[in-house]
Image (cartoon, rainbow, N blue to C red):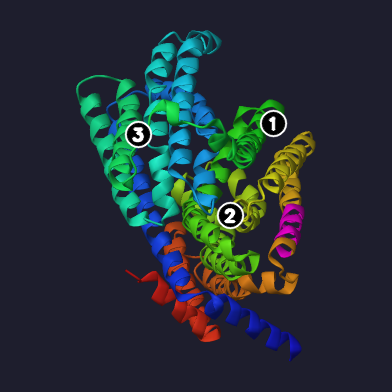
Amino acid sequence: MPCLREFQTTLHVITRVVPAPFTVNIFRNVKWAGLSRIVATACQFIGLLVLSRLLTPAEFGLMAVAVSFLALANVVKDLGTAAAIIQREKVEHRQIFAVFVANVVIGMGACLMLITFAPAIARIYEDAALADVIRVLAVALPLSTAGAVHQALLERGSRFRRLAVIEGIGAVSGLIAAVTAAIHGLGVFSLVAQTLTGAAVSSLGAIMASGWRPNLTLKSIVIKDLMALVPFSARVAMANLVNFGARNADVLIVGKLLGAAVTGAYLVALKLMLFPLQLVTFVVARAAYPLMSRAQEGGTLAVQPIFLHTLAIISTITAPMMTLLWLLREEVVIALVGGRWTLVPQLLIWMAPVGFIQSLTSTSGSLLMAINQPATLLRLSWLTLIAFAGAFAIGASFDLKTAVQLYLAANCAYLLIVGKLICRYLGLSPAKLAMAIAPAVACSIGMAAISLLLKWKLMSFPSGHRLAVVCSLGGLAYVGLYRLTFKDQFQRLIRGAIVK
């Protein structure tokens, strides 16, 4: 009975203590940020379907190599200043102007650096055409940094509806530009045109919508205004860079130790796990960060219910998603990539739980930035790099399954460390933190039992039909269990989801 009362008390904290404006804004932000992400993903998918018929595999491969270098530059393109603008309690016009000028300079500098090193990169890959692609693609850096401050101001004010419109127009414009260029025979540069057009339209839209204008002169820049942001922004930028290394170390290690064929199977399993998760976690974390930043002005206790609510939203979506991926891993692989990828379902046994764990730990970055703990964020980033790279380095010396098993163990340990830090910073008990995800986990277990029975009953059906039926009925079972077992929280989630 004491445990039950504690559980009910915590659910009350999660669902009722969050002030109404924050509750509404969380869902509103998630809805519009999610819509923006969906439109961008749809444009990428449509572009792949259309452009794959107009361009050659070699041209796609050339763009993939060029984009990898652009992605590395994008990680530190604003040196964390956008996150600093969103997080700070008060931001003066002079500080915003100083950051704007710094971002433009950084963007131009990164662009010139890529242009300078483009021939050397082309020689490394033994493809002369790569140099021209990188040179033109580098222009995307100053285009995007020109609007970085304006986008940060829109996010700071939780104006995600405007951002969704802007980013949607940018994605559609990029798609139109790419298809038009490909029809006119521009080859790989049609893909470059998609990136440049999207960056230009999105930056211009943010500049027009934010309401802020750089109406000062360079003489008005005070270095101390910019330096006041450096302790925060530099650590965030460094954490982003380290995280970039952590996200790519696994592929590099597996490729080096186990070869291309095994790496290909791992990449397929990784994409099946990450694609739906990234859509959810990126959107919710982006939507929650400005709200937690504003709430931290009232102390960490004001952030606590918002963070718990955010964690509950993420777990409500990712727990059933990863449960069904684990349960139907063979059917998913056959339906999406074909039956020849026999190693992938074996990997998903371990990687589906990793996906759920990472969806929970992904919230720590936004929280630590919101409560002004960038040093802790940087330490955690180094920890992930060392732990995850170490797990793959040790495991891959045996085989891929061992590497993935150690990766799961490292993620479990990391979850415990992150949970302990969150409890300390927010004044939470471990029980209250765990209870934020308890409804989703409990209902997912019930759904798994029902889905397992359905799968067994339908084993004589074709794989695709079994996948469709079990996913549909399993999803309905999850919703039904949630509604029956946690009625109040379910109703609040539904009301929040349809908020205008």
Q: Element under label 2?
A: helix
Q: Which residue in the protein does label 3 denote?
A: 199
Q: Relative to the observer, which residue lies in front, 348 or 416?
A: 416
Q: Relative to the observer, which residue lies in front, 142 or 168?
A: 142
- As measured in the structure, the alpha-carbon distance from the residue carrying label 1 to the one carrying label 2 is 33 Å
Query: Residue at coordinates 53% horizontally, 78% vertically from top-left?
Result: 15
Residue 323 appears in the figure: no
- As measured in the structure, the alpha-carbon distance from the residue carrying label 3 to the one carrying label 2 is 27 Å
Query: Residue at coordinates 26% horizontally, 19% vertically from top-left?
Result: 186
| In the image, residue 9 lies in the stretch drawn in magenta | no
Which mark sits nearer the N-terminus, 3 or 2? Answer: 3
In contact (CB < 8 Å): disc 3 and disc 2: no
Q: Is residue 201 left or right of residue 491?
A: left
Report the magenta residues as a range. Answer: 412-423
- Amino acid at pointer 1: Ile
For the C terminus, give its image quadrant: bottom left
Please give the label number shown on residue 253: 1
